[in-house]
Amino acid sequence: MLISERIYKYLEEKGMSQNEFAKRTGISQSTISDWRRKGTNPSADKIMIICDVLGISPYELLLDTDSKNPREYRQTDYVVIDKNSREYEIIRMYEKLDPGAQKRLEGYLQALSDLGKE
């Protein structure tokens, strides 16, 4: 599931309209509509404000969980990434990938993570 799809899922669960969401986040309605229409995701710099408005943690937004009871948002649930860091650069490169390539990369990362647990 794309991040944008999860945003719409949370909007529906919270009974928040796209218009209200746009006003509260400061993100234009056309940009929000593009996420659904074009199957794109919000830019990394918008994630925190989106999470604040939806009352969820970045983990809930970024990870594909089926939890119907998302944990309470706490500021300690995320790490701020310096825009000059390698991690930020990796996130930006990920965002530029098409959805299929993103999925393959996520699978590769999961496999590496699983290897570390053995």
Image (cartoon, rainbow, N blue to C red):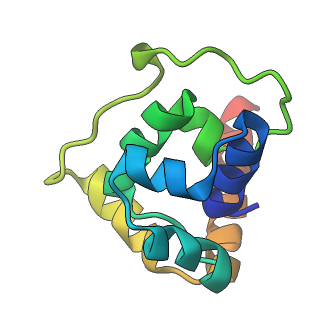
Q: Is residue 49 left or right of residue 94?
A: left
Query: Between 19 and 71, which is closer to the camera in this rendering?
Result: 19
Q: Percent x, y for residue 96?
A: 44, 79
Q: Which corner quadrant holds the C terminus?
A: top right
Query: Between 61 and 86, which is closer to the camera in this rendering?
Result: 61
Q: Is residue 69 left or right of residue 11?
A: right
Q: Which corner quadrant holds the N terminus?
A: bottom right
Q: Is residue 50 left or right of residue 45?
A: right
Taking the spot 71% from the left edge, 35% from the top edge, the residue there is 14
Query: Between 70 and 91, which is closer to the camera in this rendering?
Result: 70
Residue 37, relative to residue 43: is it above or below? Answer: below
Taking the spot 72% from the left edge, 31% from the top edge, the residue there is 117
Q: Percent x, y for residue 31?
A: 45, 73
Residue 13, relative to residue 55: is it above or below? Answer: below
Residue 116, relative to residue 43: is it above or below? Answer: above
Q: Percent x, y for residue 47?
A: 42, 48
Q: Looking at the image, how many numbered discs can be counted on the residues?
A: 0
Taking the spot 31% from the left edge, 54% from the top edge, the residue there is 45
Q: Percent x, y for residue 84?
A: 13, 54
Q: Is residue 21 left or right of residue 102?
A: left
Taking the spot 67% from the left edge, 46% from the top edge, the residue there is 11
